[in-house]
Image: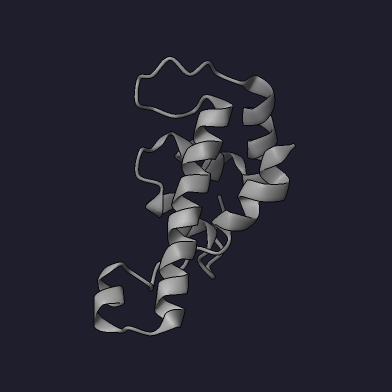
Amino acid sequence: MVFNRYLLPLLLQYDSTAEESDATESHGVGASVQIAKNMHAVRASEALSRLSGLYGDGSLIPYNQAAADALKVLLTPKLSSMLKDQIPKDLLSKLNANLESPE
């Protein structure tokens, strides 16, 4: 499938500590690269939610059961349900956090 080879790795490059406001303060190349990675992670999350039909904006995107089931296995059911949110930063932060919770 497209998402486990191309889109999921982009989700794992998100860094919640590198916010867009940091780009104006530090003019280093590293900050710009991380901001670009964060943007790609957000776009990949939006693409996954649309491919699975989980996107919650009321559009006419049909539900894709096979894709939704695959994402539940790859991300866990709790994280895959967060693809319904229109703001994916919460999903990306939880996915890349160094914490383990018993859910």
25 vs 53, nearest the viewer? 25
Return the x and y of residue 83 as percentages of the image width and height.
Answer: 48, 38
Return the x and y of residue 38 as percentages of the image width and height.
Answer: 45, 61
Q: Residue at x 47, y 47 (%)?
A: 43
Picture layout, residue 97 above or below residue 25: above
Q: Residue at x 35, y 44 (%)?
A: 87
Give the quarter of the image for residue 18: bottom left
Q: Residue at x 50, y 54 (%)?
A: 41
Picture layout, residue 28 above or below residue 101: below
Left or right of 23 on screen, residue 40: right
Left or right of 1 on screen, residue 24: left
51 vs 103, nearest the viewer? 51
44 vs 92, nearest the viewer? 44
Give the quarter of the image for residue 93: bottom left
Q: How many numbered callouts?
A: 0
Left or right of 36 on screen, residue 11: right
Return the x and y of residue 52 as percentages of the image width and height.
Answer: 57, 28
Left or right of 101 on screen, residue 57: left
Q: Residue at x 52, y 24 (%)?
A: 53
Picture layout, residue 89 above or below residue 77: below
Return the x and y of residue 13 as percentages of the image width and height.
Answer: 55, 64
User: Which quadrant holds the N terminus?
Assistant: top right
Picture layout, residue 50 above or below residue 9: above
29 vs 69, nearest the viewer? 29
What sort of colour scheme is used for the picture? one colour
